Amino acid sequence: MAVAKKKPAPPARIELKKEDTVKVITGRDKGKTGRVLQVQRESGRILVEHVAMIKRHTRPNPQKQIKGGIAERESSIALSNVMIVCPGCNKAVRIKHHIDHVAGGKSRRTRICRKCGQSLDKK
């Protein structure tokens, strides 16, 4: 009997980056804010600091200096469950893009807060 494999989510444009501050808008950790630790672009999921904590049972391995026991760590959550927090207005906001034309015929795309218009990219 064949087991059906779960299809990966279609690739969406992920506008969050590592070190962004995000707020969870739905799920069991609704209302929590945290820093993005990892973005998994293939699966459309992110790892947020101190959000979706799970207990992981690890076996001791003396060769790798792993002590073993029950460790708490973050679990990934769906990208659609979070919104970026604007440093200016300190609220969860949607992202707008602004294209700056740089010398040499090149252009740079920056992320902008839809509420206050402040840049979300750290320089």
Image (cartoon, rainbow, N blue to C red):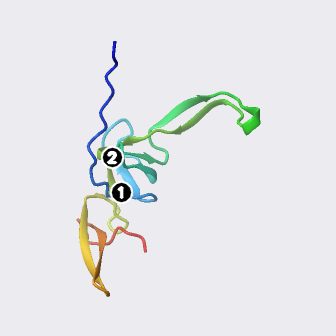
20 relative to 71, above or below = below
In the rendering, at what x and y percent does residue 104 appear?
31, 86
How crowded is the residue under tag 1: few (<14 C-alpha within 10 Å), some, or many (20+)? some
The residue that appears at 70% across and 36% down in the rendered structure is 66
The residue that appears at 45% across and 43% down in the rendered structure is 51
**What is the C-alpha distance between the residues marked 1 and 2?**
9 Å
Quadrant position of the C terminus in the picture: bottom left
The residue that appears at 42% across and 70% down in the rendered structure is 122
Q: Which residue is mark 1?
A: 16
Q: Which mark is residue 79?
A: 2
Do the CB atoms of the residues marked 1 and 2 lie less than 8 Å apart?
yes
9 relative to 94, above or below = above
Relative to 56, 28 lies left or right: left
Disc on the earlier residue, 1 or 2: 1
Q: Secondary structure at mark 1?
A: loop
In the rendering, at what x and y percent does residue 100 appear?
27, 79
